[in-house]
Image (spheres, rainbow, N blue to C red):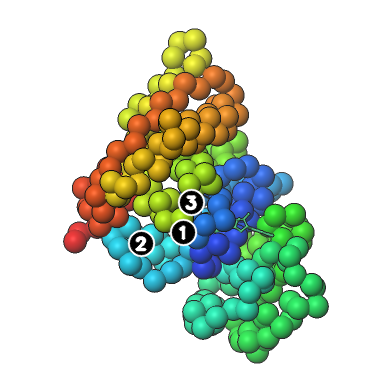
Amino acid sequence: MKSGFIAVTGKANAGKSTLVNSLVGEKVSIVSHKPQTTRDRIFGILNGEGYQAVFIDTPGLHRAKNALSQYMMKEAEGAPEGADAVLYLLACDKQPDKYDEERIKAFAAAKTPFILVVNKCDVVDEALIPQRIAAFKDVKGIDAVIPVSARTGKNLDMLKEEILKFLPQGQPYFDEDAYTDRSLRYMAAEIIREKALYNLSDEVPYGVGVNINKYEVKENGVTEIDADVVCEKKAHKPMIIGKGGAMLKKIGTDARFELERLTGGKVFLTLWVRVKPDWRDDPAVMRRLGYDPGQK
Ligand SMILES: Nc1nc2c(ncn2[C@@H]2O[C@H](COP(=O)(O)OP(=O)(O)OP(=O)(O)O)[C@@H](O)[C@H]2O)c(=O)[nH]1
Ligand SMILES: [Mg+2]
């Protein structure tokens, strides 16, 4: 039996969460076209024949601007420590920048096995891929370079095989029917946040947090969820509620649909919008939303 942890890192929007979901075959992490979607480290567990691979999805690497993004960077930067292998995702719809180069070289120089994953290969001409990774051709310590599409699944079997080479012998860390370390309560908050990210435009979603006030499975099997959608500016509240409540209703309907699939039963969802001014720099609110602000 082989088992181990694989940290999945890279800049925001590279497709880390999409990749973890595709590898695991379940929706572990929420995904959106907006950068900085993932805020915590989330385990996605793949149970295969004779192995258990625990993928660590992480927030996208970026320059922190507030206490929330400091928390996110801590989550991201801490993940490769102690992992058995590191994957760095590079989206090939753009040329890698200096930041990618610095990070890739640092991972290559470290002792942990390191795979460069070139994602979003479905959107570019294959002939362009060598150009995207030209800067890394002579970098020592990159154990494999694998072009994939997390969206279509292209080359994911090849990536799995490569990862298997680096998994140490050992017993599984988690139950073999588990696909994540996170609770349904956590997943519910994330799904609501994902629907807010999809439906709201511009700057509002970055300042949205979700707090589950109640998560209760009733005797009749109905799951009752009561949650706050927290925003950071007074002006954002009417935008989240929408005309005649239409926006909040849409977020709620989208979330309920997915929660019913997740729980396999009926869900009764109530959402409230709360303003917590500039909460992304407020340790008390951050803590309540599950983002540990640390000592400061
Ligand atoms: N065309 C294409 N789009 C992809 C692929 N992988 C991810 N995407 C899209 O890229 C966007 C970002 O995907 P995420 O998986 O949320 O990216 P992430 O790296 O987890 O982003 P953060 O959590 O913000 O760091 C979404 O719109 C995805 O649908 C891919 O292989 N091909
Ligand atoms: Mg993500």
Q: Position of residue 228 (x, y in %)?
A: 34, 35
Nearest to the observer: residue 198 or residue 4: 198
The span from disc 2 to disc 1 (Cα, nearest Å) is 9 Å
Q: Secondary structure at mark 3?
A: loop
Q: Position of residue 250 (x, y in %)?
A: 51, 34
Q: Is mark 3 within 8 Å of ligand 1?
A: no
Q: From what the image shows, is residue 269 above or below residue 122? A: above
Which residue lies under the disc numbered 1?
A: 36
> Pointers 2 and 1 in contact (CB under 8 A)?
yes
Q: Residue furthest front?
A: 243
Tell me what residue is drawn at x 30 percent, y 38 percent: 274
Q: Amino acid at mark 3?
A: Ser
Q: Secondary structure at mark 1?
A: loop
Q: Is residue 12 left or right of residue 71?
A: right
The span from disc 3 to disc 1 (Cα, nearest Å) is 15 Å
Where residue 69 is drawn, which disc sits there?
2
Which residue lies under the disc numbered 3?
A: 201
Quadrant position of ligand 1: bottom right
Q: Residue furthest bottom?
A: 138
- The answer to which image quadrant residue 130 occupies is bottom right
Q: Is residue 140 left or right of residue 210?
A: right
Q: Residue furthest top?
A: 220
Tell me what residue is drawn at x 29 percent, y 49 percent: 233
Q: Amino acid at mark 1?
A: Gln
Upstream in the sequence, badge 3 or badge 1? 1
Tell me what residue is drawn at x 48 percent, y 47 percent: 200
Tell me what residue is drawn at x 57 percent, y 29 percent: 257
Q: Position of residue 17 (x, y in %)?
A: 57, 54
Q: How many marks?
A: 3
How busy is the neighbourhood of tag 3: few (under 14 within 10 Å), some, or many (20 plus)?
A: few
Q: Is mark 1 within 8 Å of ligand 1?
A: yes
